[in-house]
Amino acid sequence: MFDFTLGAHSPDDIAHIIQVSLAPAFILAGLAQMLNVFSARLARIADKVNTTAKELNQAGAAEAHYLSQQLSYLRRRSFVLDAAVVCVCLGAGLILSSILTLFVGALRDTAAASVLFACFGAGLLFTICGLGAFLTEILMAGRGIRVEVDRQQDQALVAERG
């Protein structure tokens, strides 16, 4: 794949190496945006935990049971979101490693292609895992919203009858 040595590099060879390294760099920009979304979601979960914890201190027995379940649910969501963050960060690190391998491989005439393939492939795999964990967290959030809507509707019905 890299059948040239440092002494034989022409400006065109160096330009080609830089061009090849740009595709993974664009993937990194997308991963950075994903991490931004993850951190915003984690902040929303933290806010909801704080609010729920305050309500728990002032709640009656029945309400305290529900709020305790809500806190457990938010805890599980935060773990799934943590898994998404870890996977995307590992993916980004491996993609960066593949870019580094590309440059080091161009400087040294070695079997850099296999390392490049492994780093980039593993980076993509971790990114897929991160997206899967994020999808799980999104589905959990949707379920939580539906449970809360059902609870509010049940309370409204009880209030109408009572």
Image (cartoon, rainbow, N blue to C red):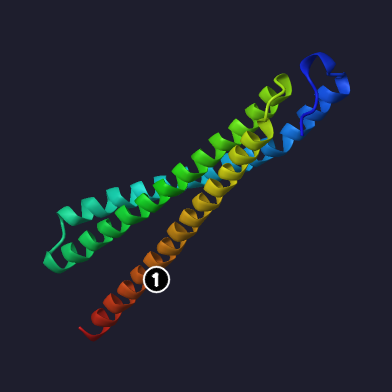
User: Is 162 displayed left or right of 14 in the figure?
Assistant: left
Residue 65 appears in which quarter of the rendering? bottom left
Viewer-nearest residue: 17 or 105: 105
Name of the residue lying farthest toward the top: 7
User: Is 47 displayed left or right of 108 in the figure?
Assistant: left
Residue at image position (72%, 23%) is 109
> Circle 1 — which element?
helix
Residue at image position (39%, 53%) is 80
User: Is 74 displayed left or right of 115 in the figure?
Assistant: left
Viewer-nearest residue: 3 or 23: 3
Residue 46 position within the rendered picture, expressed as x and y whole percent measured from the top left: 34, 47
Residue 32 visible in this rendered orientation of the protein: yes
Q: Quadrant of the N terminus?
A: top right
Residue 142 position within the rendered picture, expressed as x and y whole percent measured from the top left: 44, 65
Identity of the amino acid at label 1?
A: Arg
Viewer-nearest residue: 96 or 41: 96
Residue 33 visible in this rendered orientation of the protein: no
Residue pointed to by mark 1:
146
Residue 157 position within the rendered picture, expressed as x and y whole percent measured from the top left: 29, 82
Residue at image position (42%, 50%) is 81
Residue at image position (44%, 42%) is 86
Residue 119 appears in which quarter of the rendering? top right
